[in-house]
Amino acid sequence: MSRLALFGVAAALALAATQAESPGAAHAQAGTCIPSINGQDIAEHTTPGKAIDINRKSQDLELGIISRNAIGNVDLKIEAGPWSTNIAPRPQTARPDADWLGTSPASDYAKGGTGLYKVTITSTGGCQAVAWINITGKSPFATYAGAAATVVALAGLAIQAAGLWLLFQRRGWIWLALAAGAATGAGLAVLGQQAGLAALVPKSVVLWVAPPVVIGGAAGFGLRRWRGGRPRGRDDEDKLDDEPASARGDATRA
């Protein structure tokens, strides 16, 4: 049963990885406008691997838009995984290379910390576009998200080690090692995002979570087999209680 459960978890993770939406699947722009971020046309930066670097210590996020139509009010949605925030760039004097220009300070665009973020640009005039940015200028371990992810990853490792030790002692269950492995992988996924290594999208999260889950499950299954099957628990104690007293006495004298 444990082997089937382990294979089932591995198969589910592999299936999720193959079917998850690619980070670059969203199309860059609707064609009615040409946005740029910090002077770079976003058409060249529609995937996490080609994200626009922005240093939170020394750079604002500058959004420029060229459009044949009226642009109206502009909104930016910045997101990573389940977290998102909406900001309204502060309009600036337009330049020859931009019909509309706006800026946002780091206190606005870097609320999530550092790393890779998807930026969705929308305007009341019909402009809509998507780009990726990579916020730098701070250690991923020094951000709130990075610090929390570090704690989760280390706690997952500790619990997974404790679970494997309990399995070695025939007192634990393999599901503890699997669940702790998932927590470790989730923490590493957020750290990877904060470090700018990988976007926090389903496919990437699966690739971070799968190794500790599979390794922990395989190690736990191996320990159970080596130590002789299922954990020792109440059933064993009940069997001792059901054993005749005379038999226990004979065993003691022997």
Image (cartoon, helix red, strand yellow):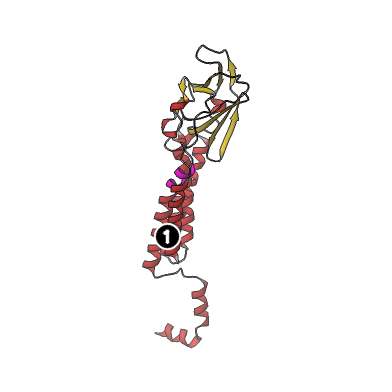
The foreground one among 98 and 156 is 98
Q: What amino acid type is highlighted by mark number 1?
A: Phe
Residue 62 magenta-highlighted: no
Give above or below for 253 relative to 175: below
Tell me: 224 left or right of 152: left
Residue identifier under label 1: 7
Which quarter of the figure is the C terminus placed in?
A: bottom left
Which quarter of the figure is the N terminus placed in?
A: bottom left
The foreground one among 237 and 132 is 132
Give above or below for 172 relative to 191: below
Q: Is any atom of residue 158 visible in this view?
A: no
The residue at 59%/33% (across/down) is 85
Q: Is any atom of residue 243 visible in this view?
A: yes
The foreground one among 45 and 109 is 45
Main structural element of the magenta stretch: helix, strand or loop? Answer: helix
Q: Would you call the spot at circle 1 few (<14 residues within 10 Å), some (14-19), or many (20 or more)?
A: some
Give the mark count: 1
Task: Where is residue 10? Give x, y as percent.
Answer: 43, 55
Q: Secondary structure at mark 1?
A: helix
* Residue that extends furthest to the bottom in the rendered view of this protein: 246
Task: Where is residue 179? Give x, y as percent.
Answer: 49, 55
The residue at 63%/21% (across/down) is 72
Task: Where is residue 89? Give x, y as percent.
Answer: 58, 22
Tell me: 78 left or right of 48: right
The foreground one among 223 and 101 is 101
Report the span colored magenta. Answer: 200-209
Task: Where is residue 39? Give x, y as percent.
Answer: 47, 19
